[in-house]
């Protein structure tokens, strides 16, 4: 039986209570940064929704995969084989150079560079809000993913892990307004700090003097100085330099080398010096 | 012992569907126009069943949105709670509006919610204004014309009261 008059606390008091709750949550999360343990739980809680959201897309993908003709498949197969051949050729060269580099480094007495361990993950969601540029991937603590882990795609660095759930993780993209990455120009080793602009596909280089030797089209690699990203991965290419003398610094924009709005598979990186290890599934 | 109220499953299913639609991947061109599904569904239930769905639900849905969208926990909750309060106070007036009038009110409410979320983001980390964030105000109002009859049908079919 529905009662007309007994309704518990009044609407206004409930509003005040809920507002207080919201402000408290914002305070705890933003100022105290104390939500991480709860976030792991919450992320795991909403993971089914995220997997549900990509279900139609996956079904469609499977369907289009299963109706491909033999011709299409054989053409694709041929193209892939050629690519493998090309990559293998480059790999041989790389191995030779790596050995040479190690020998030279030994001669010089500097530390040898270890290769990092990797894991492939799939993008299962993108944040649809303009003031946060994020991806959700389908690997989490159960695969050994950790907070602050560098994330790459086939062409370069795309971001770092912001928070982790059981089997999902959220990646903050380099184009997010709150993200900055330390870079080094490939051509002349000039260091630069690139901050996201909130516009996908655009970074801004900060504190570049007007007299800089950087040029449009210069490739910027990660410098490894921030401690988060490993050294020497391509990140962005300088798109425009505006030298407005009325401003203290030149306005330099750079475009990320990877198409951040089209990422489907990402590569998680475990730097060799870190103690954390990837946990591979048994069937892989 | 309190018996579980009938229709709780229906309510939960509509919430899950709305949350799923909120994070479903879409081409970037349409993504900007994605209606605010969670707020739409919540507003419908507040207008239809104000004694069951109200500020508490708004708070929970807001926190879930925050976690799903990866924003600071509490930001969306804040916006949802304020909108839910306004809708719950005026549910009788809203019920008597024509569908088109309702859609206009819904647009205003969603504009308010988005404005609160945007201002919170400005306050927390200096977000820059992007007009595209407010496109869903229009699309949500348009979608209301279908969401309302659809959810009413669902409510009558499954006898949620």
Image (cartoon, rainbow, N blue to C red):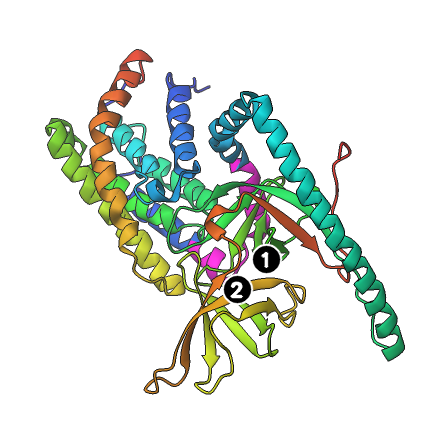
On screen, B131 above or below B13?
Answer: below
SS class, disc 2: strand
Which residue was labeled with disc 2? A236
**In the foreground, A244 or A83:** A83
Which residue is at 34% across, 36% downward?
B38
Which residue is at 55% across, 23% downward?
A68
Residue A196 image position (x, y, % from top left): 45, 64
Which residue is at 60% across, 22% downward?
A70
Q: Is residue A147 left or right of residue A240?
A: right
Disc 1 residue crowd, few under 14, some 14–19, many 20+, Cα 10 Å: many
Q: Residue A1, can we see it? A: no
Chain of residue at mark 1: A
SS class, disc 1: loop
Q: Is residue B58 left or right of residue B93?
A: right
Which residue was labeled with disc 1? A156
Residue A138 image position (x, y, % from top left): 59, 40
Disc 2 residue crowd, few under 14, some 14–19, many 20+, Cα 10 Å: many
Q: Taken as a whole, is the magenta stretch helix, strand or loop? A: helix
On screen, B99 above or below B59?
Answer: above
Is B123 one of the magenta-colored residues?
Answer: no
Q: Quadrant of the C terminus of chain A?
A: top right
Q: Quadrant of the N terminus of chain A?
A: top left
Residue A181 image position (x, y, % from top left): 55, 67
Is A34 one of the magenta-colored residues?
Answer: yes
**In the foreground, A221 or A269:** A221
Q: Residue A275, can we see it? A: yes
The region drawn magenta spans A26-46
Decide: marks 1, 2 in contact (CB < 8 A)? yes
**In the foreground, A234 or A126:** A234
On screen, A150 above or below B137?
Answer: below
Residue B65 image position (x, y, % from top left): 42, 42
């Amino acid at each position: 039986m529905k009662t007309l008059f007994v309704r518990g606390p009044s609407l206004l008091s409930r509003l005040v209570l809920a507002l207080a709750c919201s402000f408290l949550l914002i305070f705890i999360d933003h100022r105290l940064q104390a939500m991480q343990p709860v976030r792991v739980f919450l992320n795991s809680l909403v993971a089914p929704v995220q997997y549900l959201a990509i279900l139609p897309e996956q079904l469609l993908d499977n369907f289009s995969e299963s109706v491909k003709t033999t011709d299409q498949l054989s053409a694709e197969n041929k193209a892939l084989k050629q690519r493998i051949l090309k990559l293998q050729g480059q790999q041989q060269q790389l191995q030779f150079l790596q050995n040479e580099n190690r020998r030279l480094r030994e001669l010089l007495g500097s530390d040898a560079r270890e290769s990092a361990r990797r894991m492939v993950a799939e993008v299962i969601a993108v944040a649809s809000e303009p003031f946060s540029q994020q991806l959700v991937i389908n690997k989490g603590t159960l695969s050994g993913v950790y907070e602050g882990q560098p994330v790459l795609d086939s062409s370069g660095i795309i971001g770092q892990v912001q928070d982790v759930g059981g089997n999902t993780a959220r990646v903050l993209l380099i184009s997010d307004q709150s993200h900055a990455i330390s870079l080094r120009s490939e051509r002349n080793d000039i260091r630069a700090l690139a901050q996201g602009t909130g516009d996908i596909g655009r970074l801004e280089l900060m504190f570049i003097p007007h007299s800089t030797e950087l040029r449009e089209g210069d490739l910027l690699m990660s410098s490894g100085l921030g401690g988060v990203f490993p050294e020497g991965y391509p990140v962005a290419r300088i798109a425009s330099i505006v030298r407005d003398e009325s401003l203290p610094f030149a306005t330099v924009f750079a475009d990320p080398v990877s198409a951040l709005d089209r990422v489907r598979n990402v590569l998680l990186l475990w730097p060799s010096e870190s103690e954390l290890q990837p946990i591979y599934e048994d069937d892989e | 012992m309190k018996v579980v109220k009938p229709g709780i499953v229906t309510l939960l299913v509509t919430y899950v569907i709305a949350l799923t639609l909120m994070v479903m991947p879409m081409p970037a061109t349409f993504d900007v126009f994605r209606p605010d599904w969670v707020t739409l569904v919540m507003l419908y239930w507040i207008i239809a069943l104000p004694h069951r769905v109200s500020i508490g639900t708004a708070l929970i849905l807001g926190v879930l949105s925050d976690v799903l969208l990866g924003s600071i926990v509490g930001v969306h909750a804040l916006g949802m709670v304020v909108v839910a309060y306004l809708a719950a106070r005026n549910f009788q007036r809203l019920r008597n509006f024509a569908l088109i009038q309702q859609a206009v009110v819904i647009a205003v409410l969603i504009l308010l919610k988005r404005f609160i979320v945007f201002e919170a983001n400005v306050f927390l980390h200096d977000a820059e204004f992007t007009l595209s964030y407010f496109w869903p105000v229009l699309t949500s109002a348009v979608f209301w014309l279908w969401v309302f009859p659809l959810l009413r049908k669902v409510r009558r079919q499954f006898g949620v009261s």
